[in-house]
Amino acid sequence: MDDEYAKLIRRMNPPRVVIDNDSCENATIIQVDSVNKHGILLQVVQVLTDLNLVITKAYISSDGGWFMDVFNVTDQDGNKVRDEEIISYIQKTLENDEVLLPSLRGTVGLMPSEEHTSIELSGTDRPGLLSEVCAVLADLHCNVVNAAIWTHNARAAAVVHVVDDITDCAIEDPKRLATIKKLLRNVLKGNNDLKTAKMTLSPPGFTHRERRLHQIMFDDRDYVKVRKTEQGNIEDLKSGPCITVYYCSEKDYTVITMRSRDRPKLLFDIVCTLTDMQYVVFHGVVHTGKNEAYQEFYIRHVDGLPISSEAERERVILCLEAAIERRTSEGLELELCTEDRLGLLSDITRIFRENSLCIKRAEISTQGGKAKDIFYVTDVTGNPVEQKTVDSICEQVGPNMLHVKWNPCHSEKLPEEGTISYLFGSLFKVRTLQSLKLIGSYT
């Protein structure tokens, strides 16, 4: 009865989307008003992110059963969104109560798995792992049409879309699927995987690749810190995101503040993790500037309670750090543009392996018979790739196929800040430090 009543309320109050290109000088303002439901913030952010829009500011409010959010967005060049097709897509998609339409751009986002076989992989990361996976798929005549590969804290996860090399359709033969599953699981296990490697076939329907990657790595507990012992050094965590979690007693919320270097899809990654951890964002603000991002959220668990223990607080911090770090670009960015063919990915990753490169992250896509693959690589020790190695790889791959872009050096560490709210200011009229109790004061 509760579900039917909620559906009735949503039908009586359909979502309303206003897109304004006049009120702000340097951004398009998108305002979304809707009946509130768990996960709606993620749905809205996902739609904007899949269009490669940059969210420069956001104001979130979903208290009292109503969802009212405002987003300032630009395209990747920092311009307002003027494309009428994109504006119409945003309007129609966000006003659709289910928000289940395929992505306009197609290469990232919701992908109908009837057109391909979707494979999900997770296991211990090691040099050459992606090369071995691609070699197995090529030997089994599976052509990779799209894929996303992430590594973090010595764990690796991938969502790979393959088709049969001959028919260019999804692979449905149970015996062949069983063979693929068996061989890939053997590759993932390696010789010293202390955890159980996983290889699964996604069920029919729509799969959001990056959403699934967050869930896979979260389930694999990649947020558990791994100390680096090479040369006796321990990983320096001070240059990473600055996250604080504390209790606002006046309004009975848990408050999360985050400061990190800004990058594409940062808000999506954070909201994904909070949603998967069963937290609801009641109020929030996002502000970006000078390559830094500031975010503050007032949250409770879906059961209506704030965070109630020190262990839970620490786990939230670790999970949010992982969400921010998974997509952080490491090392050298390599972009491959060429005609697609069976075994192309296997050949490229083999060349990387033979030149002692480690793939930290990869985005694989094909369209119209063209392959466009992006790799983020370091040497086997995690250090930048030497120029002579880059030249050798370009020569082996072929002329005008591999484009190299050095990532800028890391900027200076973010300045120290206190744990007091600096984004929301006086939204809840917090007057004294006594009203902000650290989580240790819960008990």
Image (cartoon, helix red, strand yellow):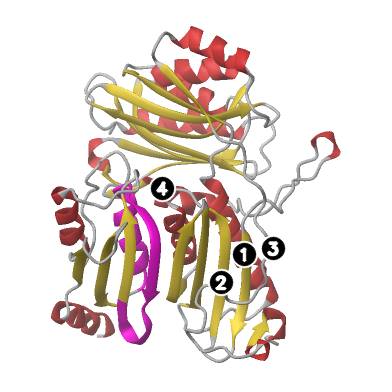
In the image, residue 320 lies at what x, y percent? Answer: 56, 60
The reply to whether the magenta stretch includes residue 57 is: yes
Residue 210 has which mark? 4
- Badge 1 element: strand
Report the front residue among 246 and 75.
75
Residue at x 53% of width, y 23% of height: 132
Q: Are marks 2 and 1 in contact (CB under 8 Å)?
A: yes
Residue 175 visible in rendering: no
**Relative to 82, is 199 on the left or the right?**
right
In the image, residue 270 lies at what x, y percent? Answer: 48, 60
Q: How far is mark 1 from mark 3, CA to CA?
A: 11 Å
Residue 416 has which mark? 3
Q: Is residue 64 above or below residue 417?
A: below
Residue 256 has which mark? 2
Quadrant where the C terminus is found in the figure: bottom right
Q: Residues within 10 Å of mark 1 (few under 14, many from 20)?
A: some
Q: Magenta residues?
A: 38-67
Q: Amino acid at mark 4?
A: Glu
Query: Residue 373 sits in which quadrant?
Result: top left
Q: Amino acid at mark 3?
A: Glu
N-terminal of the pair, mark 2 or mark 1, is: 1
**Relative to 163, is 409 on the left or the right?**
right
Q: Amino acid at mark 2?
A: Ile
- Badge 3 element: loop
N-terminal of the pair, mark 1 or mark 3, is: 1
Residue identified by numbered label 1: 243
**Relative to 174, is 19 on the left or the right?**
left
Q: Amino acid at mark 1?
A: Ile
